[in-house]
Amino acid sequence: MALKIVKGSIDRMFDKNLQDLVRGIRNHKEDEAKYISTCIDEIKQELKQDNIAVKANAVCKLTYLQMLGYDISWAAFNIVEVMSSSKFTYKRIGYLAASQCFHEGTDVIMLTTNQIRKDLSSPNQYDTGVALTGLSCFVTPDLARDLANDIMTLMSHTKPYIRKKAVLIMYKVFLKYPESLRPAFPRLKEKLEDPDPGVQSAAVNVICELARRNPKNYLSLAPLFFKLMTSSTNNWVLIKIIKLFGALTPLEPRLGKKLIEPLTNLIHRLVITLHRASVEKNVCLIGLVLPIVCVCVCVSNAVLISLSSGMPNHSASIQTVPHCLYVSLVTVKYLGLLAMSKILKTHPKSVQSHKDLILQCLDDKDESIRLRALDLLYGMVSKKNLMEIVKKLMLHVDKAEGTTYRDELLTKIIDICSQSNYQYITNFEWYISILVELTRLEGTRHGHLIASQMLDVAIRVKAIRGFAVAQMAMLLDSGHLLTGNMQRNGICEVLYAAAWICGEFSEHLDDPMQTLEAMLRPKVASLPGHIQAVYVQNAAKLFATVLQKHEGATDSQAAQDTSQLLIERLPLFVQSANLEVQERASCILQLVKYIQKLQQKDVEVAEEVSALFAGELNPVAPKAQKKVPVPEGLDLDAWINEPPSESESEDEKPKAVFAKEEPKQSRARHIEVDEKELARRREARKQEQANNPFYIKSSPSSQKVYQDAPGVEHIPVVQIDLSVPLKVPGMPMSEQYLKLEEERRQKERADKKKKDKKKKKREKRGKGKRDDSGPESEEDITPAHQVDIVTEEMPENALPSDDDDKDPNDPHKALDIDLDKYVPSAENTLHKVTVCMLHAEKQGDLSITRHFLVFLVPLLVQKSLKNKKKKQKKEKDEKKKKKRHHHHHHHGDGGGGDSVQNGTVEEEEEEEPLPVSRFLPITEQKNTVYDIQGNLQDGSQVVVSVIFENKSNSFLKSMEFNVLDSLNSKLQRPEGASPHDGLVVPFQLPPGVSNEARFVFSVQSIVMPQKLKGTLTFIVKSEDSSTHEKLDFKLHFTCTSYLITTPCYSDAYAKLLESGDLKSSSLKLEGLNMPFHHLLARICFHHHFSVVERIDSCASMYSRSIQGHHVCLLVKTVSS
Amino acid sequence: MRFMLLFSRQGKLRLQKWYVPLSDPQKKKISREVIQMVLARKPKMCSFLEWRDLKIVYKRYASLYFCCAVEDQENELITLEIIHRYVELLDKYFGSVCELDIIFNFEKAYYILDEFILGGEAQETSKKIVLKAIEQADMLQEVGPIYFMKAFSARWAI
C-alpha cells in the first residue's frame, strides 16, 4: 500500500502539471498544434492510470485545452470519474471540466444523476456548492426532473450559502422542467423574506426573471415586492424589483398609483445626487434612473401626468437625462439616448426638442451610438418633421463610410417612412423620389427592399401611379447606370420593380413605345434571370398598351413597327440560359408573330391582346393565407389517401428524376377530394393568383371571378389636389419637395384662415380625412394629395389570432403557469377535480405533513372562503333587496325543515359524479398523484373515485386505502371486516401508470361539510429493495357536492320564488376582487349552479340537490 | 446573462463561461464573432454593442477584455457593474491581478466567477462573502499535490 502511494507520487513528479502545459504552449508558438497533440497523447496516458490525482491533473489540463478550442468530448467519461472523487480537490476540478464541456447532447450526463444527488446531500457545503454550480451549466430536462426535489429541499438548507445557490438554480430547473414550478413556487416565495440578504436577492432575481416573461401570474406578489422595495437598501435588488414592477403595472393600473410615492422619493434622492455627482458616478445613477423611467412609462398615462405636473422631481429627471448628451463620456451618451427612447413614448415633446442633438449623434464615430440615435429618430418622426429628418438622413447616407452602416441607414429610412402603414407620409411623390435617389447608392445590399417598397407604394397608393410610372420609366431608361456593376450589388433588383410597375400600369405612360424599347435593349440580357423574366413579361404588357393606343388610328404603321421591334429583339431572350426567361420569351414571340400576321390583314387585335393582362390588382396582407379559417369538417392533418408504404415510396424515388413528376404525384393525391372542395380551392387559388402581383395572369376569366368578389368596390376613389405638380421633369430631386411642401403648408394655412373666416364648405375637407388621426397639431397638415392607402386584404372570416408573433420555441412559454390557481386541470372536465400535484420528498412524516399543508391549506381556505363568500353575499342581498330576492332551501316533501348552510339533505338515487375531496400524497422519490372524483349513489351512499398515478420510477404494490370513519360518514367495507381495516386497492402500479379505484361511503347527513382523514399504505419496490410507505390524506365533502347542475328557465324560477315554499338567508363578503363573471363561473363550476339570469353585477342562480330540493341563489356585487 | 468571455488584445480567449448549453462549434463561432467585433472598436467608444438579439457589454482592463452577452431587456449598467465587480474580486484574490495570473490559474478564475455568478445571475453582491467562500473552499482543497503548491507559492509568498 505504502509502496503504491510512493509510486504514485513519483509518477506524478514526471507528469506535466497545468503550469508546465501553459508554459509549454507559450514556448511553442510556431508549432503549437504539434505540441498540443503530444500533450493530448500524454494526457490520454495519464487518464489510463488508477491514481485519481493524476487523472484530475489530466482533466484540469484538458479544461485548459478546451478553452483554446480543442475538442475534449472524448474524455467526458473521465471527467465524470473525477467528479465522483470523494476529495473536494478533485471534485472541484471535475465539476469545472463538466460545466465547461458538457451540453445537452453529452450522453454521459445520464451517468451523473446519482453522483450529483449524492453531492447535493453531502454534509460539506462546498461539495454541494460545486455540484450546484456545475449543474447550473449543464442541467438537462432529465436532470432537472430527477433532481428537482433534491434542489427544492436545499432551498431550505440551514446554510445561506447553499440556499442562495439552490434558489438561483431553480430558475434553470424551471426552464428545463416546467412542471416543477408549481410545487416549488411556495417555497420560492418564502425565500423572498429570507433573513439572509443574499438568498433574498437570489429569490428576487429568479422571480423577476419568471415574471418578466409571464407577468400576470405574479401579480399576487406585488404587495410583497412593494414591501421589499420600500425596505431594501441594496441597489441591485432595487433595480430588479423596479424592473419587475415595470412588467406588472400594465396589468394592474392601481399598482401604478401606489408606486408613485416610493418612486418619486427614489428619483428625488437620485436626482439630487445626480446633480452633485461626478460624471463617473452619473453612469451608475442613470442605471437606476433608467428602469424607473421604464416603470413610469408603463404606468398609465394619467398617473404620469400627475407625476410630471404634480411632482416636479420627475420632470427634473427627464431634464437631467439630455444633459448627459453633452458629456463626452460615450457611455453616458449611449445611456442618455437609451433613456430618451424610453421617455419618448410618453413625453415625445421633451425629446423632440433635442432633435438636433440626436441628429448630431449620427455623426458620432461610435456605431453603437449612431444606431441608438437612429432608433430614436424612428420613434420621433411625425408628419411635420418626417421630410426634414429624412433629408438629414439622406445627407448622412452620402457621407457614411462603410457599407454596413450605410445599409443600416437605408433600411432605417425606409422603416421610418413606411412605419404604421405610411402614417407619416404626406406626399408620396416625395417618397418615390427618395426611393429613386436611394437607388443611386453604391454597393447597397438592399435593392430588394427598395424594390418592394416601390411595388407596395405603386400598388397601394393609386394616386401616385402616374408619377411612379414616369419615374420608373426613367429608371428603366437609365438602367445601364445601375447595371454597371450590378452583379456585385443587389441594386438591380430595383429594375425588377420598375419593369413591373411600367408594365402593369402602362396606361399611365406617356411614351410606352420608348419604354418598351428600353426594356428590350440587348444589355438587359446581362441582368439576373428573374429580372429578365419580368422584363419580357412586361414588355408584352407594354406591347398590348401600344397596340391599343394605335388601334383605330389611321396609320397602322406604328403598331406594326412595334411588333417588328419585338420580333427582332425577343430572340435574344429566347436563347437565354434561364428557363423562365426562355419560356416566356418564346411564348410571347410566337404570340407577337401571330399578331403581326393579323395586323398585316388589318384585323383589330388590340382588344384581345390587352384582355390577356386585364384586371385590377389588390394587395394581400402577408398573413392573409394563414388566417383563412379552416372550413368545418376539414381535417388538414388527416390523410386524404392512405399513406404510401415505406417500401413503395422508396421504389418511386429513383424514378422522380425529372422535376415535373413531382407536381403530378401531388396532384394525384388530391384527386379524391370531393367536387365541392375542389371548386372552392380553385376559387381560392384564382383569387390568390389575381391578387398576387407576381403572378402572370393565365386567363381573363380569373379576373372576372375576382371582380365579383367583395372588396373591390371598397377601393377608394382617389382625389388629386392639383396644387402640386404631378409631373416633375428629369430625375426627381426629393429636396424640392421640402420647399414645395413648405409653400403648400403656408398656403394651406392661409387658406384655412380664409375658410375659417367664411366658415364655408368644411364638409369637403372632413370627408377626405384618413382614418389615422395623429396628435391634434398634426391634423393641420393635410396630405399633399388626398391619398387613400388601400389596406391589405384579409380573407373573409379571418380568424383573429393574437399569438401570431409568439415564438413557439420560447422556453418561457412553458412557464406560463397560473400559480394562483391551485387546481390546474379542474376546468377541463366538469365534475372532475384534479386536486393537487405535489412533488416533495419524504423525510419522515413531519415533512409530508408540511408539504401537504402547504398545498392543502390554501386550497381548503379557498374552498371554504367561497362558501363563506356565498353566504355573505346572500346576506347582503337580503339586506339590499328584501323583496325581490330570496335564498331558499326548499325541502321537497317537507322533510327536515331546518335551513342548512348551503347544502341539502341527501338520500336517494342518481349516480352523479361530483368533486368531493382533494388530497395530497407523496412518497420518497416517487410521487404518486391522486385525482379524485366522487359519486353519489343509491341510498345514502357516496362513491369516491380516486385516480392513483405512479409518477415515480419504482413499482408500487399492495396498496391499502383506509379512512378513519366519522359518525356521519363511513367507508363501506366488506362484510365481516372491522371498522379499522383498510381496503385493498385491486391493482398494482408500474412506474408511470395510473388507475382508478372507487370507494363507497355511507353518509348519514350531508347538511354539514366534513373532512375525513385517511391513510394509504403501499410497498415501493425498486430493483434492490422494497420499502413500506405510508401516505396521509384528507377527503373533503362539501354540501354543494350534493348538488346537481340543472338548467332552469326564468319563468319557472319566478314561479318558484313566488310560491313562498322556500326558506332564505343571506350573507355578505368583503374583500373580493375577482371579476363578477369569474365569480359566477366559479360558483357554477365548483358548486354546480347554473345561471338563470344575469343583469349587470347581479345574477340569479339555480341548482337542485340529488333529492330534487330547489336551491335558488342571488349573487350581487355592491360597490362600497 | 448568456455568456462571459475574457480575451486578450490579440484575440486569445482566456476564459469562457456559457450559461446556455451550446455545442462546441457553436460556441467557437459565437466567440470568434464577438471577439472580432469588440476588438474592432476604438478605445473611446462606448461599452455597448448590439449583436443579433443580444447586447454585448464589454470593458477593457489593461490587456484583457471582459465581455458579457445579455438579453435585450437586461440593464447594461448592471452588467458593466458585474464585470467590474468580478475584476475587483480577481484583484483582491490574486493581489493586483494581471493577465498571467488568469492564464496560469485559470481554474481559480473560474471558481471565483462561479461563486459570484450562478446560472447567469449574480448570486452574491458582497465581495467579502464571495472571497470568504473561495478561501474556505481553498482551505478544504488538499495542499498535497505538488503542482498546486507550486501554483500558489509564487502568489502567496509575495
Image (spheres, rainbow, N blue to C red):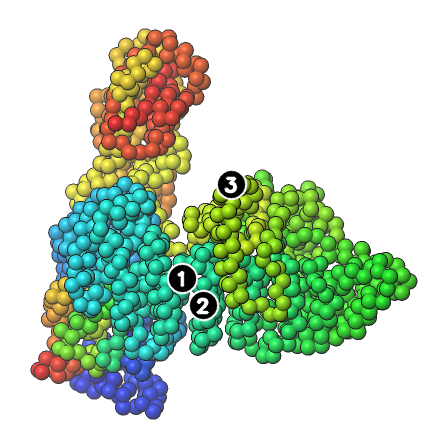
In x, y percent, where is residue A271? 19, 58
Answer whether labels 1 and 2 touch (C-beta < 8 Å): yes
In x, y percent, where is residue B77? 25, 64
User: Label 3 sits on what residue type?
Assistant: Lys
Q: Secondary structure at mark 3?
A: loop
- The reply to the same-chain question for discs 1 and 2 is yes
* Residue nearer the viewer, A1115 or A116: A1115
In x, y percent, where is residue B96? 15, 78
Q: Secondary structure at mark 1?
A: helix
For the question of whether residue A388 can be seen, the reply is yes
Residue B22 drawn above or below residue A758: below
Query: Mark number for residue A377?
Result: 1
Q: Quadrant of residue A891?
A: top left
User: Label 1 sits on what residue type?
Assistant: Leu
User: Label 2 sits on what residue type?
Assistant: Leu
Residue A986 drawn above or below residue A965: below
Upstream in the sequence, badge 3 or badge 1? 1
Q: CA distance from mark 1 to mark 2?
A: 10 Å
**Residue highlighted by disc 3:** A759
Query: On what subunit does the disc labeled 3 rest?
Result: A
Upstream in the sequence, badge 1 or badge 2? 1
The residue at the point 61 percent across, 47 percent down is A716
Q: CA distance from mark 3 to mark 1?
A: 38 Å
The residue at the point 16 percent across, 42 percent down is A846
Answer whether labels 3 and 1 touch (C-beta < 8 Å): no
Query: Mark number for residue A393?
Result: 2
* Residue nearer the viewer, A406 or A857: A406
Residue that protrudes farthest toward the left in the picture:
B157
* Residue nearer the viewer, A90 or A662: A662
In x, y percent, where is residue B5? 29, 72
For the question of whether residue A186 can be seen, the reply is no
